[in-house]
Image: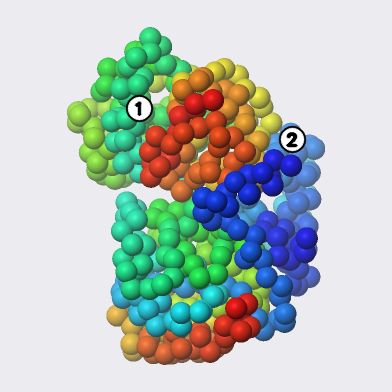
């Protein structure tokens, strides 16, 4: 196979690009060996952008320079980790996903005495709170436990705090309405200065825990697994590995919810699932 | 190996066929076209796509600013008047000839050689999808085999991306601002970058067909 034509391999057009590719490979290898975080199978174009952003933010000019700083300065590693684990999302992102969940999945969940939900890669928690609101309105929250996990403790702390910028509430409110909310969005938070503080009752049944999809194993079996817009940051090989982790963690007839432009079609686990809603990327495990 | 199983399974459904991998004859063979547009972009894109020859087979990837919750109506709109397959890009989808891929609403679209990657990183210059993000990743991946086209728009997204395309040896075309519904975007590119061509909208398709002859591009 010619390297130049294979997706995912280093371009070979100029020495400069090759060198950059090598530097990023060395950086991720160094981080893995020294800190244990494994970014080696992250999607290269996005990783490259995020790494360069950190290079400039640290006042450096090369990826190798960042490598030296990161290996000798754990605080710099923390900053890169934050760069790599924050995804910019909104409450009820893709409102039709939540609307479809409400209409098609909630009736199934009603038949269960107890529902375990895993929100994998929850970042700052906007979508966790969204799901808690939805389940509350469907009178299901009391018999659900949501496990919200992320690779980054600092990000998880923000999710636990449940405090979000007030200026995002307009978008969140219109998403909430489009997602079929049956109450009033503003009942779920108190505005204070520039922030919206969400009601602690929403997270009473939420367990926030650090979990690394790349290096950690299955920790429970679930009726619902959400992993939305996380796998896009992984290359194909890693996506396959994480999908088999989800399969290992999925009850029979459990529900998998992915991001709007993610699919299990190309994954090795695809035969285990049937589509519940192709457009909204909702699948059910059937074998 | 599981990866190969997954690949062949993907084949019958859609997307990622290996047939796309063609040998690269020379440095002047263009392999990908990226287009950026914003305000007025629907009409401009429609004009270009509709005027390309039927056998045009260089894949096209488009970043058009669009509303966060815009849906599949946009690709459907473009499909009405063209023989090309116009779709919203999916994560890790393979880039195939005869296709026009749009950056999905509220995602950045980045390309690697032969493959598209999505991200939900923060907006760049208030835009997601960002033209700069698409252009910069494509420039890194395709070097001199890339053509970047900047059409109508009312902000300066795309200028940095066009700069990167030139740095990597690619070709940059901008719509003549005088023919653009919103001239700011093409004018910003022309001001920052030594562009290869400034063309009226109606001439862009012909230019692309000329520099990407079907015989060279694999048919």
In depth, the one of B65 and B101 nearer the eye is B101
Could you tell me which residue is drawn at 74 percent across and 42 percent down? B1
Q: What element carries label 1?
A: helix
A128 w.r.t. B101: above or below: above
Instruction: Note whether residue A80 is visible.
Output: no
Quadrant including the N terminus of chain A: bottom right
Q: Position of residue B2 (x, y in %)?
A: 69, 40
B74 w.r.t. B192: above or below: above
Q: Position of residue B211 (x, y in %)?
A: 56, 87
Residue under circle 2? A35
Q: Is mark 2 on a helix, strand or loop?
A: helix
Q: Mark 1 lies on which chain?
A: A
Q: Which residue lies furthest to the top in this view?
A: A113
Q: Mark 2 lies on which chain?
A: A
Q: Quadrant of residue A131?
A: top left
Q: Quadrant of residue A189?
A: top left
Q: Which mark is residue A105?
A: 1
């Amino acid at each position: 196979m010619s390297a130049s034509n294979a997706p995912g391999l280093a371009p070979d057009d100029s020495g400069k690009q090759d060198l950059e590719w090598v530097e990023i490979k060395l950086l991720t290898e160094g981080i893995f060996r020294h800190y244990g975080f494994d970014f080696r199978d992250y999607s290269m174009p996005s990783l490259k952008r995020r790494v360069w952003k950190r290079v400039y933010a640290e006042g450096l000019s090369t990826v190798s320079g960042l490598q030296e700083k990161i290996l000798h300065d754990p605080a710099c590693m923390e900053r890169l980790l934050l760069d790599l684990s924050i995804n910019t999302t909104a409450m009820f992102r893709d409102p039709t996903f939540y609307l479809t969940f409400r209409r098609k999945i909630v009736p199934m969940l009603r038949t269960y005495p107890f529902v375990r939900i895993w929100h994998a890669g929850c970042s700052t928690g906007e979508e966790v709170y969204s799901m808690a609101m939805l389940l509350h309105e469907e009178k299901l929250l009391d018999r659900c436990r949501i496990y919200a996990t992320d690779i980054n403790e600092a990000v998880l702390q923000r999710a636990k705090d449940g405090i979000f910028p007030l200026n995002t509430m307009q978008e969140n409110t219109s998403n909430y309405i489009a997602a079929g909310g049956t109450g009033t969005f503003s009942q779920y938070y108190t505005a204070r200065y520039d922030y919206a503080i969400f009601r602690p009752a929403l997270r009473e049944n939420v367990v926030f825990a650090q979990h690394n999809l790349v290096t950690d194993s299955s920790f429970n079996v679930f009726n619902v697994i959400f992993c939305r817009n996380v796998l896009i940051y992984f290359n194909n090989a890693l996506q396959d590995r994480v999908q088999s982790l989800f399969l290992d963690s999925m009850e029979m007839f459990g529900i998998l919810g992915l991001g709007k432009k993610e699919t299990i079609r190309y994954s090795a686990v695809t035969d285990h699932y049937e589509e519940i809603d192709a457009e909204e990327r909702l699948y059910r495990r059937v074998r | 190996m599981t990866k190969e199983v997954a690949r062949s399974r993907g084949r019958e459904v859609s997307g990622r066929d290996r047939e796309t991998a063609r040998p690269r004859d020379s440095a002047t063979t263009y392999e990908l076209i990226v287009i950026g547009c914003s305000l007025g972009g629907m009409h401009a894109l429609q004009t270009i796509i509709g005027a390309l020859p039927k056998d045009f087979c260089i894949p096209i990837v488009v970043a058009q600013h669009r509303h966060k919750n815009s849906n599949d109506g946009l690709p459907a709109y473009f499909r009405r008047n063209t023989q090309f397959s116009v779709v919203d890009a999916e994560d890790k989808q393979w880039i195939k000839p005869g296709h026009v891929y749009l950056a999905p609403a509220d995602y950045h679209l980045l390309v690697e050689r032969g493959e598209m990657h999505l991200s939900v990183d923060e907006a760049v210059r208030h835009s997601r999808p960002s033209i700069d993000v698409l252009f910069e990743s494509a420039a890194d991946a395709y070097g001199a085999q890339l053509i970047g086209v900047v059409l109508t728009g009312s902000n300066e997204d795309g200028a940095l991306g066009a700069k990167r395309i030139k740095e990597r040896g690619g070709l940059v075309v901008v719509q003549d601002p005088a023919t653009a519904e919103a001239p700011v975007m093409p004018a910003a590119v022309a001001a920052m970058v030594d562009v290869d061509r400034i063309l009226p909208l109606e001439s862009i398709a012909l230019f692309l067909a000329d520099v990407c002859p079907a015989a060279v591009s694999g048919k």
